[in-house]
Image (spheres, helix red, strand yellow):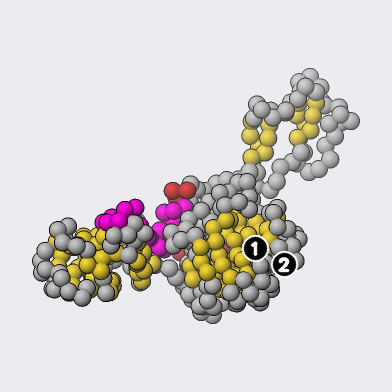
């Protein structure tokens, strides 16, 4: 601020609510920032001041909104109407054939990835969903919340974002959900290379116990593409600058691993669990979780793994299941079944079966 006199209003006119008089080499105006931004000192700015976007960790309740984490893989072909998880926490339901891939080229400058939806046949809708469990959405009840996401793609498309709720705690994606009508929507026209931001406000009913985010493609023709990036849902009627739900990449990974945790070896015989033989065809293994899961995992998926005693050749599993009686959200007791070859009471390990692409995953998804 200049001392001794007020700035000349003709030199630095204040024209909007929140504008500030300040000083550069002459009196100057600092235009008001966006809602939710804070004023900070910055010697590199001409006036020595600037508005800083809100980047607080925890304001975004959409986990993996920047599509950073892809534990299950980076390419998914023809996800059926039954739906599959792709990028962590995101399920896709396709009305027609297509692919979901991790996109590294067409993405916002502020992110490393986007989620790309490509239609390989005509489709009424190829949607991407995320559920928010009761524990994470209690504070939304009776409040206005804002859903925002960046989108690019084939210019003829008319994508949409939507929110629905269930009065059942931690409801599944395919169970009954009731749409919430947006009180306000911003939907610019999209194009193939430059991201625009879609913004919608919703009033959440006090009876809601699960929320469902939908990023909908609308009708897609063969070869049409959509790119989704930086999805955020926050309390209030303003879309603020994007930040990860976990604050950092490590925090985001931890938030994802609460729902799904995959152990992937990096060599042909990487070890992922340990236990002992029970009979000639069965062994039991203890596998600790990376962190406490949402609930005791209810499903596992695996490929290219088996069991060995470090002396004899790896034996392929014919089945690998969770023993619920000895499991919990922090560790699992697994029962591995083979055709033959296990020695009772001998130590055994779960390991990659001569394949560096071996993995085992544990799901606590809604």
Q: Residues within 10 Å of mark 1 (few under 14, many from 20)?
A: many
Please indicate, yes or no, whether residue 183 appears anywhere in the rendered image. no
Q: Position of residue 301 (x, y in %)?
A: 36, 69
Q: How many marks?
A: 2
Residue placed at 72% from the left, 67% from the top? Answer: 157
* Foreground of the two, 131 or 103: 103
Horizontally, residue 27 falls left or right of residue 153, namely: right
Please indicate, yes or no, whether residue 76 appears anywhere in the rendered image. yes
Q: Residues within 10 Å of mark 2 (few under 14, many from 20)?
A: some
The numbered disc on residue 157 is 2
Q: Quadrant of residue 207?
A: bottom right
Residue 254 belongs to magenta span: yes
Horizontally, residue 137 falls left or right of residue 107, namely: left
Query: Does the CB distance between marks 2 and 1 fall below 8 Å?
Result: yes
Q: Which numbered disc flags the more N-terminal residue, 2 or 1?
A: 2
Q: Secondary structure at mark 2?
A: loop
Horizontally, residue 12 falls left or right of residue 136, namely: right
Residue placed at 63% from the left, 46% from the top? Answer: 109
Q: Quadrant of residue 7?
A: top right
Residue placed at 65% from the left, 54% from the top? Answer: 239
Q: Quadrant of residue 15?
A: top right
Q: Identify the magenta region.
A: 252-272
Q: Position of residue 216 (x, y in %)?
A: 63, 69
Locate the N terminus and report the quarter of the image it occupies: top right
Residue identified by numbered label 1: 226
Q: Position of residue 91 (x, y in %)?
A: 52, 68
Residue placed at 41% from the left, 63% from the top? Answer: 259
* Foreground of the two, 80 or 354: 354
Q: Does 26 sit above or below residue 338?
A: above
Q: CA distance from mark 2 to mark 1?
A: 8 Å
């Amino acid at each position: 601020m200049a001392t001794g006199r007020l700035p000349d209003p003709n030199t630095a006119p204040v024209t909007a609510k929140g504008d500030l008089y300040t000083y550069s080499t002459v009196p100057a105006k600092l235009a008001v920032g966006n809602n939710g931004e804070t004023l900070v000192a910055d010697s590199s700015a001409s006036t020595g001041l600037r508005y800083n976007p809100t980047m607080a960790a925890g304001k975004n309740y959409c986990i993996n909104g920047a599509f950073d984490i892809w534990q299950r893989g980076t390419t998914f072909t023809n996800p059926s109407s039954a739906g599959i998880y792709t990028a962590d926490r995101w399920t896709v339901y396709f009305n027609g054939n297509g692919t979901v891939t991790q996109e590294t080229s067409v993405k916002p400058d502020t992110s490393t990835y986007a989620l790309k939806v490509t239609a390989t046949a005509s489709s009424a809708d190829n949607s991407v969903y995320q559920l928010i469990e009761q524990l994470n959405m209690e504070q939304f009840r009776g409040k206005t919340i804002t859903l925002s996401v960046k989108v690019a793609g084939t210019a003829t498309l008319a994508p949409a974002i939507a929110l629905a709720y269930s009065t059942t705690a931690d409801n599944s994606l395919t169970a009954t959900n009731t749409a919430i009508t947006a009180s306000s929507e911003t939907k610019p026209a999209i194009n193939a290379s430059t991201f625009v931001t879609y913004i919608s406000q919703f009033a959440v009913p006090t009876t809601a116990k699960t929320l469902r985010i939908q990023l909908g493609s609308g009708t897609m023709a063969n070869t049409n593409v959509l790119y989704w990036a930086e999805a955020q849902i926050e309390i209030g009627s303003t879309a603020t600058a994007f930040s990860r739900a976990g604050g950092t990449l490590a925090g985001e990974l931890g938030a994802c691993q609460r729902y799904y945790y995959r152990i992937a070896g990096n060599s042909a015989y990487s070890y992922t669990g340990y236990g002992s033989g029970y009979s000639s065809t069965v062994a039991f293994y203890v596998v600790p979780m990376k962190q406490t899961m949402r609930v005791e995992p209810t499903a596992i998926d695996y490929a290219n793994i088996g069991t060995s005693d470090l002396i004899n050749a790896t034996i392929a599993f014919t089945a690998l299941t969770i023993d619920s009686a000895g499991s919990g959200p922090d560790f699992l007791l697994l029962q591995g079944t083979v055709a033959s070859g296990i020695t009772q009471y001998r130590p055994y390990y779960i390991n990659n079966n001569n394949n560096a692409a071996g993995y085992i995953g544990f799901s606590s998804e809604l």
